[in-house]
Image (spheres, rainbow, N blue to C red):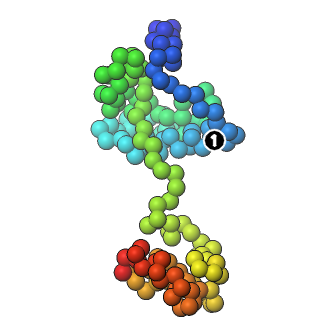
C-alpha cells in the first residue's frame, strides 16, 4: 500500500492521540460529522454523483471502520495540510470539518426547553399558576414578586433591561 509507510510515520511522529469511545459515542459522532462538514463548507458543492443522494440518507454508515461522509468535499479546503510534511500525503483523502459546541448557548436555551420544566431560581418552585419573567430582560422567571426581590442583587448585574 502506497501510504502505509507515511501513515506509520504520522502515527508515531504526528502527535496523534487515541481516545476511547464508550458505547453509542461512535454512532453519535458518525451522525454529527456530516453536519460539522456542512458548517465549514465554503468553496465546494455536492456533485451530481454525491453518495448521499445515491444512497438516500446521511450519514452513509454508522459502521466503525467505514466513512460516514460523501466524497464531494474530499481534498477540498485542506491547504494547511499541504504545508505540513507528515500530513501532506493524506490531504487528498481528507474532508475538512468544523467541530462546534454540543450544548445550547444561553440565548438559545429557552427555545428547546419545556416551559413546564422551568423553576424559580430562588426557591426552585414552579410558580402559581405559572412563573413570570423578569420585566427587564425576560430571561429569568420567578414564582413570585417576593422571590424576584430576594434575587435582585444577584440578577441586577446580569439583567439586560
Residue 36 x, y percent position in the rendering: 45, 43
The residue most toward the front is 153
Mark 1, secondary structure of its residue: helix
Res 56 seen here: no
Residue 33 x, y percent position in the rendering: 50, 40
Image side of residue 63 versus residue 153, left or right: right
Q: Which of the 4 image quarters holds residue 72?
A: top left
Residue 60 x, y percent position in the rendering: 55, 36
In-front residue for pair 96/105: 105
Quadrant containing the C terminus in the rendered view: bottom left
Looking at the picture, does residue 60 appear above or below residue 129?
above
Q: Residue at x 30, y 27 (%)?
A: 79
Label 1 sits on residue = 25
Q: Which of the 4 image quarters holds residue 80?
A: top left
In-front residue for pair 142/59: 142
Q: Residue at x 37, y 42 (%)?
A: 40
Looking at the picture, does residue 114 appear above or below residue 75?
below
Q: How many marks?
A: 1
Q: Residue at x 64, y 36 (%)?
A: 21
Residue 156 x, y percent position in the rendering: 42, 79
Amino acid at each position: 500500500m502506497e501510504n502505509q509507510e507515511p501513515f506509520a510515520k504520522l502515527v508515531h511522529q504526528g502527535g496523534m492521540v487515541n481516545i476511547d469511545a464508550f458505547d453509542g459515542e461512535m454512532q453519535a459522532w458518525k451522525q454529527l460529522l456530516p453536519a460539522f462538514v456542512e458548517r465549514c463548507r465554503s468553496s465546494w458543492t455536492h456533485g451530481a454523483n454525491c453518495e448521499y443522494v445515491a444512497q438516500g440518507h446521511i450519514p452513509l454508515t454508522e459502521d466503525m471502520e467505514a466513512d460516514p461522509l460523501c466524497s464531494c468535499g474530499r481534498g477540498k479546503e485542506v491547504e494547511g495540510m499541504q504545508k505540513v510534511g507528515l500530513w501532506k500525503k493524506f490531504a487528498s483523502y481528507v474532508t475538512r470539518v468544523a467541530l462546534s459546541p454540543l450544548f445550547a448557548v444561553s440565548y438559545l436555551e429557552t427555545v428547546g426547553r419545556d416551559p413546564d420544566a422551568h423553576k424559580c431560581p430562588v426557591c426552585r418552585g414552579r410558580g402559581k399558576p405559572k412563573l413570570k419573567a423578569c420585566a427587564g430582560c425576560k430571561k429569568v422567571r420567578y414564582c413570585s414578586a417576593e422571590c424576584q426581590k430576594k434575587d435582585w442583587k444577584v440578577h441586577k448585574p446580569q439583567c439586560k433591561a
